[in-house]
Image: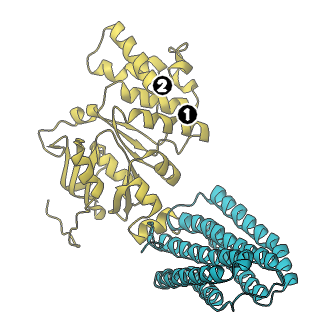
Chain colours: A yellow, B cyan
Amino acid sequence: MNATIEKPRVRLVMTDTNRDALQNKELVYKTSELNLWYGDNHALKNIDLDIYENEVTAIIGPSGCGKSTYIKTLNRMIELVPGVKTSGKIEYRGRNIFDKSYGVEELRTRVGMVFQKPNPFPKSIYENVVYGPKIHGIKDKKVLDQIVEESLKGAAIWDEVKDRLNENAFGLSGGQQQRLCIARCLAIEPDVILMDEPTSALDPISTLKVEELVQKLKKEFSIIIVTHNMQQAARISDKTAFFLNGEVIEFTNTDKIFSNPADKRTEDYITGRFG
Amino acid sequence: MSVRGKFDYDLKELQGKLLEIGSFAQEALTKSIEALETQNIELALEIMDDDAQADLMYEEINDFAILLIAKQAPVAIDLRRIIVAIKIATDIERIADYAVNIAKSTIRIGAEPLVKPIIHIKQMHMLTLEMLKLSLEAFNDEDIVKAKNVAHMDDEVDDLYGQTIRDLLHINLQNPEFLPQITQLSFICRFLERAADHVTNISEHIFYLVKGRQYDLNNS
């Protein structure tokens, strides 16, 4: 589409990106000149972000800055919103996800998502986990049993639910429900897990469990997490992107962002001077 | 007051507490050289007694800083302000300790006439004191140019230290009976030289505060 871009485009040069390239880390997502409009509202402006595998990338910023919009664009869930228009490119493993030939189901099989509020299906714990694999045609009970055990173990909830797999998922606590949703996500063997404020509805202990889980999961998956909790971003992520008014203001190592950010606006936000 | 406003207020208070302990150290250092010059044992004893106040102020700064970290979970410049406050307080407390050490040496010298006028020691003292004063101003204003100048002044202190020690050794060769006093005067020179090094550390902390990275000014 033809969109007028007001500001000259400056690609953020990240020294750690160069380092990752040297370490032969694979690029998972490459976002180039991404713009997104909700009707007339220009919600994402010239986003350039490189996301590498086996890393946790945190996205922070005040409400309405575009961070949730951005991660919902990564699995094209944003297309469900009427009136959304985009320009630019998001390459996932080298393929532009906006290409007409790219099936959205295929993309979402590779890119799972966990939401702010745990959203288990009104089914048993077991059925929640096997829902995805069944859709993908797996019918063998033994295989499904194995997927359930592995996924629940992967989401660090197996020990708590292994004796009541047939009970309704709504009977679990909020923290357990969220980990079940992560298990449901793992069951389809994704490559990337998107997390949109996954702990904002959880108590501190459940939050800690999910944070520990994220640390464990990054060995196998690439994780992109939107969070309002600065300390959470500082604790669990490798890189942090600060969004403001639809722009990426700063994207660098999390250690750098939280000790000595380069941009005054980043510093003002993380130190609580606005937002 | 907003939560952020209260935090800013507390950070200002922390800064105020540092300037307070800084003033105390300046005064202790001034008194210590005055006690040496006038061989005033009473004043030397007073310096030793007063040091408990510096220790108390130092503990207060640490407790306050730890509480701020626990309550505010600070990051970036806020975190640096608190960490730097703890570090600077440590350096200032050590400077106050050197004033006590000078007082102790003064007591050990006692009423024995000084083998030579303490001109160079006084020069070292004046320079160290000026460095401390300027470093506190640089800290207050977050002024790295001033902090760098302070670090340069340390070179003069080091030169004076070398020269004074050589003079004292020379006197010792001619007057071996003054060895105990010359030893104490050498210690005093060393205490002043170390105090100036601690002021240089303060300058380095100011650089870290402003720039967010470590600088070595002691060897620059």
Q: Which residue is mark 1?
A: A175
Q: Nearer the viewer, residue B162 or A229?
A: B162
Do the residues marked 2 and 1 share a common chain?
yes
Q: What is the tally of numbered marks visible in this picture?
A: 2
* Numbered disc in front, either 2 or 1: 1
Location of mark 2 (residue): A122
Circle 1 SS class: helix
Residue A114: % across, % down: 41, 37
Query: If the image is split into quadrants, where does the N terminus of chain A sit?
Result: bottom left
Vertical side of A150 occupied by B47: above or below = below
Label 2 vs label 1: CA separation? 16 Å
Position above or below: B47 against A233? below
Residue, far left? A101
Tell me the kind of residue under disc 1. Answer: Gly
Front residue of this view, candidates A46 and B29: B29
Specify the subunit that label 1 lies on: A
Specify few, some or many for label 1: CA neighbours under 10 Å numbering under 14, 14-19, or 20 or more: many
